[in-house]
Each structure stands twice: as C-alpha cells, then as structure tokens.
Amino acid sequence: MALTTWCMPMQCKHIGRSRRGSPPVWFVVLLALGLHAALVSVATFLAWLHRAFIRPGKDLALRYGAWAVVTGATDGIGRALALELARGGLHLVLVGRNPAKLSRVAKEAQTAAPSCKVKSVVFDLAGDATELSRGAARVLEAVRGLDVGLLVNNAGATYPGAAYFHEVETPVWEAVVRVNVEAATRIARAVVPAMANKGRGAVVNVGSGSSVVVPSFPLYAVYAASKAYIDQLSRSLSVEYKRYGVDVQCQIPLYVATKMSPVKGDSPFIPSPEEYVKAAIRCIGYEPRCVPYWRHSIQWFLASLMPDSALNLWRLQVGIRKRNEMRALLGQKELS
C-alpha cells in the first residue's frame, strides 16, 4: 500500500516559505569566511597602528641594564642611535675602527647627556680572522664588570656599487661577509652569555629589507644573503634565550639617508638617521623581527601585494641600471 503525506493548505504554504527563506549552505560558508577575513584585516590594521604610534618604548636602563654596546657607532644610524641612547640615560661602549671618529662621537654623547659614561673599543670589523678574534676579545674585556643591558649590532658593509656576482672582487665580498656575518656573531657571542647569566638583556641586530621585503636582491647578492643570515640568527637566538630573559630582535630598515644608501634625494620614505632611530628604540624588546619605521612597513605591505616575478624583474632592472650608470662613469663596457 503506498503511503502518502498530506497537509492542510495553510501548513503547506508555511513549509514552502520556510524552505525558500533558508540561505544555501555554500552562501553561509562564504559569508563566514568573508567576515573572518574582514575581522582579521581590521585586527591586523589596529595592531599595526598600536605598534607604530601608540605602544610606548621600554625603559631600557631599568629593564635591561645601564650600559649599551653599539657597533658601527661613528656614522649614520649607529651614531644617531648612540646619541639617542645617551639621552635616554644609558652609558655607552662604542665599537668602531676609527679612533678619531670614536672620540668625536664620545664627546657628542657626553655633550648630549653630561652624566653619560663612554668607553671606546677600536675594532676593524672587516679585518682578517686574527683581527676579528682579537677585536672580539677587546669587546669582552671592555664590558667585563659592566651591567650591559643592550647590544646593537649595527655595523654593516655592502658593495661600493651594484655588480654581478662574478664582477665583485674577492676582497669586497669577503669584507661584506666578515662585517655582516662573522663580526656580528663574534660580538654577540662575547656579550650574550653575561646577559643570560644575570637573567636580562636585549640584542638588536640590524638587518635589511633586501633579505625579507623582496624575494631577491640581484646585483647585491652577497650583501642580501649576509643580512638573511642576520635575520635567521636573530629569530633563532630569540627562541633560545627568551627563557633566560634576553630579548633578541632583528630590526629591518629599508632605505635610510646614510652613506650606505644607494638612493639619494628627498623622499618621505627615506628618513634621516635621527628620525629612524627614534622609532627603532621604541621597538626594542618586543617582536623578534620588526620594521621600526612606519612608512617602511607600508612599503613592505605594498610589496607583499605584488607577485615575486614582478618584484624580481623590477629589482633586476634597478640593479642593472645602477651598475651601468657607475660603469659609464668609469668608462667601462656595459653588460646587460
């Protein structure tokens, strides 16, 4: 016997309306995903606003210790950083290869902050293995007995101009590796153990947008690779030493108006060293990797929207143009 279902006319009309009023499952899923993406985007933007403009910097002397070690302290970012740290109440151990420039910066620091004590270590970070070993030993001796709370590995080296890998002379790329990789590692190795033993400290290694913001940096290959090492070293040490109270961070600047910057001229995206270090100091002790200057973080975001192939082509064209401009000045043959 066949079974049939029936309903009163009003009941059937009500059921039909209920079925037509329920949105399909796929629509509900897409709506939920869209709302989630929107909430994540808003939360990310608000977090960036907080980091860039609202979050206060830490009291470095109180949180970490009374002394700061700064490498590459005689020019550019290093000099501006040393002076700003002195104004913030820290004593300084300045590391550089030029005694006259070290003496000048020491006097500037004591003028900016008369209570600031300054020690200087003459150290050629581009020297051979013997000099690197002896220089690290001099740094270790200089900080012995001091309450060193902060190390800033700021010293860096790059090519004198854009060049294909095979064109870079051996002494040039070797100096880049020694300064950016070996010297930074040796100095960190000299300072970090004491920080871990006392249970507090901060290390800032200055990286580069060339190793993180773009997928490649042609015609500056060794420089970009050396800064990628600094980034990975910093993030790994951050995990290793967090439990010991030592905050390790890689700060990623893009172009800053220094002698190392290949970009000349005024730009809202190229801050002075003094403007940049104010943002850099406010970031110390927070994320393992950060972009201190807010306009640089906008550039990184815009770059992230582009495909790697487009960024690679753009960077290659920029590198070749700069290389050919320099070689034209020297009267040498172009290689395109």
Image (tube, rainbow, N blue to C red):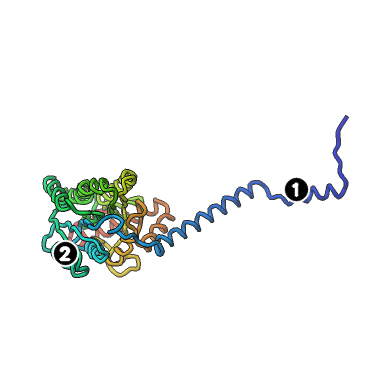
Left or right of residue 101, residue 61 in this image: right
**Which structural element holds mark 2?**
helix
Left or right of residue 96, residue 277 in this image: right
Earlier residue among tags 1 and 2: 1
Q: Nearer the viewer, residue 17 or 251?
A: 251
Percent coordinates x, y for residue 238 in the rendering: 32, 47
Decide if residue 127 is in sight here.
no
| Amino acid marked by disc 1 | Arg
For the N terminus, the image quarter is top right
Which residue is pictured at 28% across the width and 69% down the height?
265
CA neighbours of label 1 inside 10 A, class few (<14), some (14 to 19), many (20+):
few
| Amino acid marked by disc 2 | Ala
Q: Residue furthest top?
A: 1
For the C terminus, the image quarter is bottom left
Percent coordinates x, y for residue 37 in the rendering: 53, 53
Decide if residue 251 is in sight here.
yes
Determine whether label 1 and label 2 are within 8 Å by CB.
no
- Residue of label 1: 19
Q: Nearer the viewer, mark 1 or mark 2?
A: 2
Which residue is pictured at 27% across the width and 46% down the height?
196
- Residue of label 2: 106
CA neighbours of label 2 inside 10 A, class few (<14), some (14 to 19), many (20+):
many
Percent coordinates x, y for residue 209 in the rendering: 32, 55
Left or right of residue 121, residue 323 in this image: right
**Mark identifier at residue 196:** none
Report how far apart the C-alphas of labels 1 and 2 lie in the structure: 80 Å
Q: Nearer the viewer, residue 22 or 150?
A: 150
Which residue is pictured at 81% across the width and 50% down the height?
14
